[in-house]
Amino acid sequence: INAEYMGFPSIFEGQVTADATTVTRTQQSRDNFLKGLRSAGWNGPVNVTTPPVCTKGQPVPADFSILRFFDVCKDYVSFTKHNPWQPLLDETAVPYAAAAATQLHRLLFTATFVANRTLAQQVAFTRGFYGTSCATQVDVDKEYDQLCSVIDHPSGEGLAFIADLEEFIAKGPVPDPPLVTNMSCLAVNSLLQDLLSAASGPVRGAHLRFAHYETTTPILSALGLVSENPFMWAGGNISQRQFNGYYMGTMANNVQLVVFECAASPAPVMKVQLFQNEQPRRFAGCEEDLCPIESVKAFLAARACDVEELSRRCGGLQCSK
């Protein structure tokens, strides 16, 4: 893990602020990251913020809506309960999951049991089996040993495609409603404020945020890093899809904005580098990786909002737990 942070002490100065949510695994990620920084030689000040709490029946704290907007956006909560994309997903799933369902049921159940189950029931069981037993193993390592070995590779790839479609209809850049992407606007505004602060202060630090797949995917969509509809690959070469758990997802949804002071005449200029999973990416409209900060500010401002606007987009904000 040290190798991941060896350049950090020489790049950043000033304070590191680290945010997480009330969910334990985000705090564990934060703490392990900070341990990595310390072991790599970082000795600067660290501000570990207290995760905001949203209590049912109480007003939603503004800070809570930055990293867990999906929890408090009333229209989005309703959308997930009655997702209009679900019928298309179920229809698309059958041909991709049928072969795996046959293999799995043949191994685990008697012929009589299988004969009493419809194909739809078999497919539903198989998708659940994949999600609980194989998805991380296949998506991260592309391995099919242990439990996943009962499914052949083509069938496993089909189940991975269906799993990605499930994530897409809940968290991805679905065109209808655009709320799924637009509800990240307060988080984008937080990025914008950090960008302004980093560009103006004589001592520059870092603001780290540790959140959720439900947080990062809408932000990636808002930044234009995730844009395609993976349903377009149904019946085609599904390995070409952009929305792909092999390359992004629960364990791989990192986004970074890094401000550089570049030498120029008559005065230095500020530029911003965008990274997705530690790989350089370009902001839309920028012709090179290092984008002028004024262009990035305008790009983010067009996608940012305050709490009042977020509430309007969401049909209200509400603590649900």
Image (cartoon, rainbow, N blue to C red):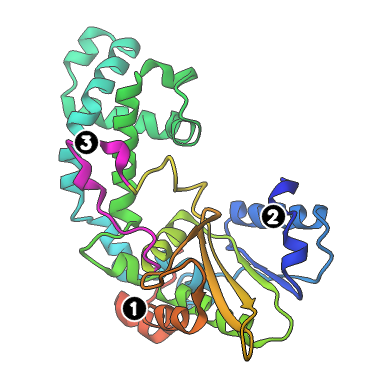
- Identified at 40% across, 75% down, the residue is 185
Is residue 224 in the magenta section? yes
Q: CA distance from mark 2 to mark 3?
A: 38 Å
| Dot 1: element | loop
- Identified at 49% across, 18% down, the residue is 146
Please state which of the two labelled residues, at mark 1 or mark 2, is closer to the viewer: 2
In the image, the segment drawn in magenta is 223-241
| Dot 2: element | helix
Q: Earlier in the sequence, mark 1 or mark 2?
A: 2
Q: Amino acid at mark 1?
A: Gly
Q: Nearer the viewer, residue 9 or 140?
A: 9
Q: Earlier in the sequence, mark 2 or mark 3?
A: 2
Q: Give percent across and percent down for residue 256.
A: 55, 64
At label 1, counting other C-alpha atoms closer than 10 Å, the crowd grade (few under 14, some 14-19, many 20 or more) is some
Residue 5 is drawn in which quadrant? bottom right
Q: Which residue is mark 2?
A: 33
Q: Which residue is mark 3?
A: 93
Q: Amino acid at mark 2?
A: Phe
When the figure is inspected, residue 306 is found, relative to residue 290, above or below; the finding is below
Left or right placement of residue 22 versus residue 11 in this view:
left
Q: Which residue is mark 1?
A: 316
For the image shown, how many numbered marks are present on the structure? Answer: 3
When the figure is inspected, residue 299 is found, relative to residue 243, above or below; the finding is below
Left or right placement of residue 94 versus residue 225 in this view:
left
